[in-house]
Image: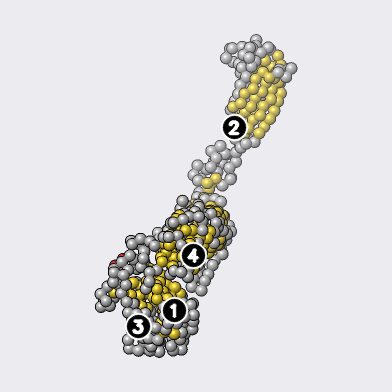
Amino acid sequence: MKKIFATLILGLSFNAVVNAQSICTITITPMDSTVCIGDSVLITSVSNLLNAGQSFNFNSASIPTGWTAAGGTSFSTPCGQNPTNTPYYWASSAGSGTPGITSASYDVFCGGVLSFDMVYSMQGGASPCEGPDEQDEGVSLQYSLDGGVTWVTIVYYSPGGFELPTNPNTSTSIVAAGQTTPYTSWSTFTVPIPLAAQTTSTAFRWIQTQSSGSCCDNWGIENIVINATGTPCGSNTVVNWDNGLTDTDSFWAVPTGDTTFQAMVYDTLGNYQCTSQIVTISVYPDAMTYSLVDTVYSYCPTFSPTVGVTNIGNSTGPYTYDWSTPSTTNPTVLPSSGLEHDTLTYYVTIHDGCNYVRQDSVVLVINQLLAIDTIYSFPASACDPDGAVSGIVTGQTVTPSHGVYYSWENAAGTPGPTASVWSNIPSGWYYLTVEDAVCQVSDSVFVDMLNPPTASFTADVQAGCNPLEVTFTNSSQNSTSYYYDFGNGNTATLNDLSSQTQTYTSSATVMLVALSSPTCGDTAYTTIAIVECGCTNPLALNFDPTAMVDDGSCILPVPVIVVPNVFTPNGDQMNDLFYLDVTNQSNVTLTIVNRWGNKMFEGTGMNPAWNGKTESGAAAEEGTYFYKYLVTGVDGTEFTGHGFLQLVRK
């Protein structure tokens, strides 16, 4: 089973109920006064029947034979009663010496303990009841092996109410006026006799080596017992216990609840001598309490808060903590998920020194408040770095020592202004970082470049006769103003795409400049040619071979159509084909059908002709056939006609 050991073994000294026939002492020391259920605890007793001359008091208002005292040679009750309402030694007038009381030399070869009652006066009281306050004004318990020539300190009782190995010999005040300490009330002290002091002639003394004068730093002592009958010289007692165990100085107990023990002391002849005080061994209940926050918040994905179990009570350590992070430390860090918004649950199992278990959980709510709500970009022109970016932030958290800070940089890492706006920048990527009191966020934006101005225009005619009227249509893009040089001595500056009309009497070069700003533009050119004009159609009656541009004056002839009414397809090479006699045509379509309307022939071309055969290639019968035609003249005029013809083979 698990043993619970205190850092300091509890040396609980209990005064015995003494039989009037003997001087009997017993001290019961449990290994621990509070344990876990099922743990083992060692109960140890030290008992003695004192030999004559081992117990001393000052009830007779005198000092024992062979003893000496300084700084107080009268024995009375100058500062109130002690627990036995009897006189005591009082260090009431230090003078220039060192107050204290020294015993005679005794045989303590068998070891044992020193027991005594002692008290310090309260700091700031009236003389002779004014107590010590400085670190070096306490009482040292010492022993000597050479008749008082040299002394060795066993323990030093500091005015603050605690024990030290030796006097620190520093004069710092550690007790305030009116302050109570464990030593400002009468208490019983039990000190084991050191191994080095266990001789047949050892003296002991209680001495105050420093004081502020005869007025001050008073203390008293009474009921001194030099119990020198312990190990290794054997025991003169028999110890029986109220749980039925007999003749044993110690035993292991396994309490399952709060349990008391009491010992009875007998001499070796079986005669009852005294009974100890009751020792209580308490058992820690399964009643652990603690504090743990239910919910913690992270207002930034990169921040992981620290939480811990606190205010643990009603239990004993050591405590262990198993977190689901995983971690075994307390407090511990709850890792963030890195998301801007998330809810995570972490669990912890708490074990105390008795292995009692508690389980709990903490909810981590990640809620990033800081955000770059909108980041605007304003495009730069193609010729100038006149773009801009701007960021709008929401959810910022500020403190008296930390505001909201902006920082920009471009794609090359060049820093920009520490403001929400960066102006006069070229096209490219820009990066914004915003930091408030709890978080940092980043975003980026691309600054577009406006399309460069493109100059473009067309003329409805590029060449013509003098005088030539030309209309220019402006199809420029990404521009806001326009400058024309028409090449005929005229110019124009415009703010729109309206068409412009000019008259030319000679050839010219026309220039258009399209501008998006006074320093950013594009230029386009076109030419206008004035040429010789006339009829350029060779088919025309008035064709002019020197003309470069047709001026619409051409006179085209009309077709002349003559239709025969008989043909003789008999193979004599004379009148074997039927065709139209046509002039000034560009196309002729001829269709022949018989009297029943069946198509015998159809042809298209400059002069299609029928050979007197059917579409299948058989010779058509003699007789009457019907024709119709469509003649297109060289000027595009169409002429139609129809009639009949005779096919004769003789």
Q: Secondary structure at mark 3?
A: strand
Query: Which residue matches tag 1?
Result: 119
Residue 642 position by quadrant: top right
Query: Which residue matches tag 3?
Result: 69
Which of label 4 and label 2 is nearer to you?
4
Residue 468 position by quadrant: bottom right
Dots 4, 2 in contact, CB < 8 A: no
- Cα distance between the residues tagged 3 and 2: 162 Å
Give the numbered dot on residue 585.
none
Return the disc, 1 or 4, that comes first in the chain's sequence: 1
- Cα distance between the residues tagged 1 and 3: 17 Å
Q: Camera-side residue: 363 or 597?
A: 363
Which of label 3 and label 2 is nearer to you?
3
- Cα distance between the residues tagged 2 and 1: 149 Å
Q: Which amino acid type is marked by label 1?
A: Val
Left-right relation of 544 to 222: right
Query: Which residue matches tag 4?
Result: 275
Query: Which residue matches tag 2?
Result: 586
